[in-house]
Structure formats: C-alpha cells, structure tokens
Amino acid sequence: MRWALVKVCLAVTVMVVVAFAVPLGLVVKEMARDRALTNAERIAAGIGPALAITTDAEQLERAVGSTEAGAGGRIAVHVPRGSAEGMSAVRIGEPRAGAADVERASGAGTSLLVSVPGGHALLQPIAVEGDRVAVVEVFVPAAELTEGVALAWLVLAGVGLALIAGSVAVADRLGTRMVRPARRLAGAAHDLGEGKLGVRVEESGPSELRSAAVAFNSMADQVALLLANERELAADLSHRLRTPLTVLRLNAASLGESGAAEQTRQAVAQLEREIDQIIATVREQRGRPAGQQAAAVAGCDVSAVIRERMEFWSALAEDERRSARLAGVDRPAQVPVARAELAAAIDALIGNVFRHTPEGTGFSVDVHHAGDAVIVLASDAGPGIRDPEAALARGQGQGGPGSTGLGLDIVRRVAESTGGDVRIGRSVLGGAEIRLWLALRTGPAAADGERRRQRHRVVRRRRGRAAEGPAGGGAGDGDGTAAPGAGRGTGKGGGTRTGKGGGAGKGGGAGRGAGTGKGGAGGGAAGAGPGAAAGAGAGARRA
C-alpha cells in the first residue's frame, strides 16, 4: 500500500509538472525570440534619422559604424537608385539577404524577417528623399533568438524535479503512517494464529485502521474467553467422569482374579490416568498467562511407545484371530512429542483397525528412520478408507456407534505439532495405510506445520458445517467411546451390539445385573447405572 501511494503521487505530480512546465518552456522560448526581434527593430529604427537627412554613402557609413551592431557588421543599408540626376544606388555594410527579399520588403512597406545563413535578417523599409524607399537590414544571429532559453528550461526542470521529489517524500511519509498500523495489525493476526492469545493491537492510524484494530482486539478477547470456557468445560466434563469411573472400578474389583478381570482392571486404571492427565493439563493451561508459549516437551522414544501399545492391543488381536506384525522398533528414536500424546495417536491408529475391519483382518505397524524424521506406517488388510480427506477431518470420519471422529484428527495434530503430516493410502496388504510423519526438528518446521494445521482446520470447519454425524455416537474413527445407557456399544473392536444396557467386548460389560460375559472391556469411556459399559479400547481374552 505504501508503494502504491507513492506511485500514484508520483504519477499525479509528473503529470502536473509536465502540464505546466512544457507550456511555460515554450512561452520562455517565444519571449526570447520576440526580445531579439524587438531589439533588431530598435536598431533599424536608429538608422532612420540618418537616412532622412542624407543618403550620402560616407555619412551613412559613419552613422552605421557609430552603433554597436554596425561596428559588429550586423547592419547593412540598401538605398535604391533615384529618378533624378545624381541619385545613385548606395550599399552600406555586408548584405546577407537576397536582392529579391530587399525588393519585396521595399515594395511591402513593412518590416520583413527572412532566414539567412547563421540566423535571420530583419528588413526594415524607410522612406528617403526622391520618393525612394531605403531598406535597413539588421542581422539577428540564431543564438540571440534562443538566448537564456536553456537556462530557463534548466530552472524549470529543476523546479519540476524538486516538486516530484518532494511529493514522493510526502507520499512516502503518509504511506508509512498508513502502513505501520496495517503491519502491526497483520503481525498481531499472525501471532494470534500461532496461539499467542495475549497479543493486542495499538489503536492508532487512520480511522479505518483504528476501527480494524478495535475489531481485532475485541475478537482476540472473545477468542481468549471462548478458549477459557472450553478449558473449563473440559475440566468439568473430565471431573464428572470420576463418579461413573469409580463405580466401574469397584465393579472391576469384584470380578475375581481371572485374566479377563485383570485386563479390565488395567483398562480402568489406564482410563483413570487419562482423565487425571486431562484435568491436570487443563489446570496448567488455565493458570498460564495468555499468550505464553507452551514449554518445550521432553519428547519420548517412538519404538518404546509402539511396543507398549502393541502389547496392550495384542490380547484383543489374539481374541479376534488377527495377525499382528511389528517391525522397526528395535532401534530407539526420540521425537519431540509428549509420551501421552504419542500413545493416544498410536492407540487411534491401531483402534481404527479393530473398529473398521472384520475379525481376522491382519495388520502391521512399521517404524522407519528417515534421518530428519521418523515414519510410522499402520497398514491393514481391510476394505480401506473411502474418503481419506474426511477421515482426517475432525468429527467427520466414517463413523459408527462408539466413534466420535476424533481419532485420526488426534494423529494429524500430533504429526503437525512436529512439522510433519499424515497421509492415507493403499497398503501392500490391500487395505488402508496411514503414514504418520514425525519430524525430529521443532524450530521453523514445527511453526510451518502449525500454520498448515490452522489452514487445514479452517477448510475442514467450513466443510463440516454442512455435514451430519450419525446418530447415537457421532462420526469419525478412532477413540472408542460409547454413550452410557444408550442401548448400543462397540463390540469386538469394531461392530455394534445392542441390548438392554449395551456393553463392550464380546458380550462383556455391565448389564442390569452387572454380570460378566465371555470377555471384558477396555478403557474408552465409562458409564454408571443400569446398562453402563466401557467402550472397546483394549479387548480382553476370552474367559
């Protein structure tokens, strides 16, 4: 905008200067010409009195020589021959005009300007004795016709350039005053987009920019308020889960000492830890000043986390006769992601296999080291993913009962927090292949990933406004939660089972009589009361 204003001002000033300077320069040139011709007429008129008195050659020569122009050889006198005796023709000085021009000026009775080599000649007719008309010729050099014109033009050009430079300087200053608030506003918008919620804009500059700054500050305040409310809501909801979780833990404690009971108790304990982590995270963020950046995470070993989660899911895989292959985890690989966040992402990847593929479908998890990144490939032999873009969108997965559509969104956010990404394709097993790219550097790459994630969220939010989620559980894939008492729950990792209370696992969960079935349910979500059950998160062995 600053350069645009300078260019506009420059163009306008140049047009104004040209409009005034060119005509003024032509006027100066014409004035110099008129001045030179007027001076020549005055010189010619000075010879007139001498011609009126005498036409004698010697006397006329003395009269001409007494003038400055005559002494310089610029005056010539043409006296024609008279009809009376003794009136001979007289020629004084060095004539430059032709005889025809002299005759024409004598016959016209008015002064005549003719071009001659080196300039112009002014022919001035003057009546003398004997009814004769003498012609005084005054030579006007070409330099005299343009005397002072070049200097005047230089002055005009200097004044014009000074005006142009002054206008550009003024426009630049004005543009700076206009652009500086706009740049502050743009910088604040970028900072707000990067999560600096405490950024505000000084309300200065033109009225339009002041209004924009006021609107931006109001928007930033509203965003901070909404985020604080969301954190409060997350803490409240997590805290409300403690009561039904306590009931579930007590029920799990009464299941005895079987392998399924131990698996259920471990799942409940894991769920308690997750809820405690959510509440602690919300409290930490709530107590942090607005705009303060989150502390750098300590990171974790990808291989160790994947081994742990595969061991967790292996029981359910064996129960459903799924072949599970793990490769590339013999070598440690540190990534800048919190252990809990990475574990949630890996659970979402593996959980998708159990929820969206039939029993007996094999899967594999491979870890590859790419120098500046770690790549995790989760592949299966299922039907694949019909709409990869929708699967990555928050709340818009393929869905099903017990699915919220947040699983792959969690995976994507973990990847983009490091500057990486998530891609969905076709695996060599014939089903879906989800590639999780975790960058090992966190500087500008992570910032770029965060900005890319913000842009993706805007696009997906617009697309998701018109989307409808399936009733009873929401759309999406990957977190394994089920609504307590809804009459429907996730069964065997992917299917649904209906009943009076709806449970998870193979007939497992708590019904009206709080009995146990063939299996148990793992930690996804918990409910209390008649029909409450845990969603499939980590299945148990058959009892």
Image: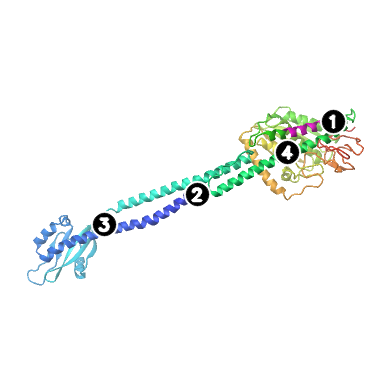
Please report the residue visible at 13 percent of the width from the left and 64 percent of the height from the top. 49
For disc 3, the marked residue is 145
Q: Mark 1–mark 3 contact, CB under 8 Å? A: no
- Residue in front for this viewpoint, 89 or 487: 487
Question: SS class of the residue under badge 4?
Answer: helix
Q: Which quarter of the rendered picture does the C terminus lie within? A: top right
Q: Amino acid at mark 4?
A: Glu
Label located before the other in sequence (1 or 2) = 2
Q: Nearer the viewer, mark 3 or mark 4?
A: 4
Q: Amino acid at mark 2?
A: Ala
Label 4 packing within 10 angstroms: few (<14), some (14-19), many (20+): some
For marks 2 and 4, give the CA distance.
Answer: 48 Å
C-alpha span from label 1 to label 2:
69 Å
Type of the residue with mark 1? Arg
- Classify mark 2: helix, strand or loop: helix
Q: Position of residue 474 (x, y in %)?
A: 78, 45
Residue 434 can be seen in this image:
no
The span shown in magenta is 269-280
Q: Earlier in the sequence, mark 3 or mark 4?
A: 3
Alpha-carbon distance for marks 4 and 1? Answer: 29 Å
Disc 1 or 3, which lies upstream in sequence?
Answer: 3
Q: Give the residue number, with chain letter if any, for mark 4.
A: 232
Closer to the observer: label 2 or label 3? 2
Mark pair 3, 4: CA separation: 91 Å
Q: Which residue corresponds to the image point at 86% horizontal and 42% vertical from the top-left?
A: 485
Residue annotated with mark 2: 4
